[in-house]
Amino acid sequence: MKTVKFALSLFLISCATLLVSAQQDTQKWEEIYQIIANMKEPSFKDKTYNIVDFGAVADGETLNTEAIQKAIDTCSKTGGGTVLVPKGTFLTGAIHLKNDVNLHVSEGALLKFSTNPKDYLPLVQTRWEGNDCFNYSPLVYANGQNNFAITGKGTLDGQGSNDTWWPWKGQAQYGWKEGMPSQLLETGRPLLDKWEREEAPLFERQAGEGHYLRPQFISFIHCTSVKIEDIKIVNAPFWVVHPILSKDIIFRGVHIESLGPNSDGFDPESCKNVLVENCIFDTGDDCIALKSGRNSDGRKPNIPTENVLIRNCKMLEGHGGVVIGSEISGGARNIFAENCEMSSPHLDRAIRLKTNNHRGGVTDGLYVRNIKVGQVKDAVIRINCSYDPKEGQGNYPPMVRNVYVSNITADMTGKTPAKYGLRLEGIAGENAVENIFISDCDFKGVENISLIRDVKNLNLNNVFINNEKVELY
């Protein structure tokens, strides 16, 4: 094998520092395992409330919102238990989960969600792409609840398509046509930006009808002790699962198939103590994206997403496998990913960090190991501190530091190659990206070994790209 050396304006670290960093890496993994082990899973009374007993009809046409909600409310008020969705197809509008309720969607059961926006009124508190507002209720929602779950082998279908919800994106590929309304109107995303810039009070930020901001599929805010396990989720209107300002979250064995616009799979935002394991993601946007608010709506509360463990997951189509950003103004810390497989001709990147100097935020501590990559389009590892340049120059330089990546293999031999093995870009004149440790990695079948700019304290140890050892001097 050849050795390729790069001359970069970097401060190279010593062997002693390498040893210390390896010890810190090991210690950090032990710490996250302990944090996750100490999380208490939701538990429920052994009592079942069948939605059929509350008037639900499994004909796929009757709107069962009232019956399902009555079962949930009754279950919670009487001390909790399981709300059972039995085998069959049940049409519903917004479902609001409550304390001590396990919504169990049985194998063979299909919860099919209405495509009538009026079935997601009244408006509820949420965040939309990182900005605080009141908007249509997510299809499944909770606010300020504790100890609840969604479980079972059944399916939740948001019925997102080029005929419903997706045209609101304002792009022809998703069914939008000239003259149709979309989130691009002044009453949509631009108004949300205006509210944020002017720091409008939350109660004044009323979206909903006439604003065309699609609802999330599953979202909850200010909640604790939540589990989503085993279910299949398809065809989301927007982001698929979006916890906000919540803690102690278990996301296990979930299968997501949603290839629509902004169909991020799992987006914990300003959340603490999160386990993601044994899940499958096939998405129209990032598979997993960690967030913490956009611009002042993230900076003012300054609540990072922290203590996240992602393991044993499979990522198929998407913009990125494990992603931090772009709405990351409140920062992220102690993020871990291991033992995952990522591959699709339509997967852009495996590991991705994205921000800019409008959004800012400090990402401190990303630990990634044992990742098998079959195919990506852009880069295996991508750090981008100038994401979405149309926003222009801002005054909040981001920072990405203390990133430890080891044992990633990628083999695109005989397939369409990725553009880059490593694509790491900070900001000229700023210490935006520093302390990056990449070791024991082997990437084959990429067009370009790397694109590295404005990175401080980059260390490559035993890194091979296209059978060439990559070193710095």
Image: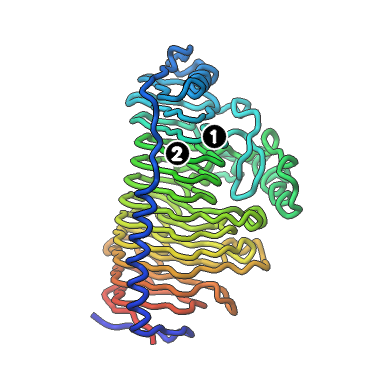
Q: Position of residue 104 (x, y in %)?
A: 39, 27
Q: Amino acid at mark 2?
A: Val
Q: Where residue 378 is drawn, which disc sits there?
A: none
Q: Please report contact status of discs 1 and 2: CB closer than 8 Å, yes or no.
A: yes
Q: Where residue 142 is drawn, which disc sits there?
A: 1
Q: Is residue 383 left or right of residue 28?
A: right
Q: Nearer the viewer, residue 296 or 393?
A: 296
Tag 2 residue = 226
- Assign the C terminus to one quadrant of the image: bottom left
Above/below status of 301 relative to 256: below
Picture quadrant where residue 25 is located: bottom left
Q: Position of residue 185 (x, y in %)?
A: 70, 44
Q: Residues within 10 Å of mark 1 (few under 14, many from 20)?
A: many
Picture quadrant where residue 412 is located: bottom left
Q: Amino acid at mark 1?
A: Ala
Above/below status of 282 relative to 325: above
Q: Position of residue 346 (x, y in %)?
A: 40, 53
Above/below status of 388 relative to 466: above
Q: Position of residue 147 (x, y in %)?
A: 46, 35
Q: Nearer the viewer, residue 37 or 257?
A: 37
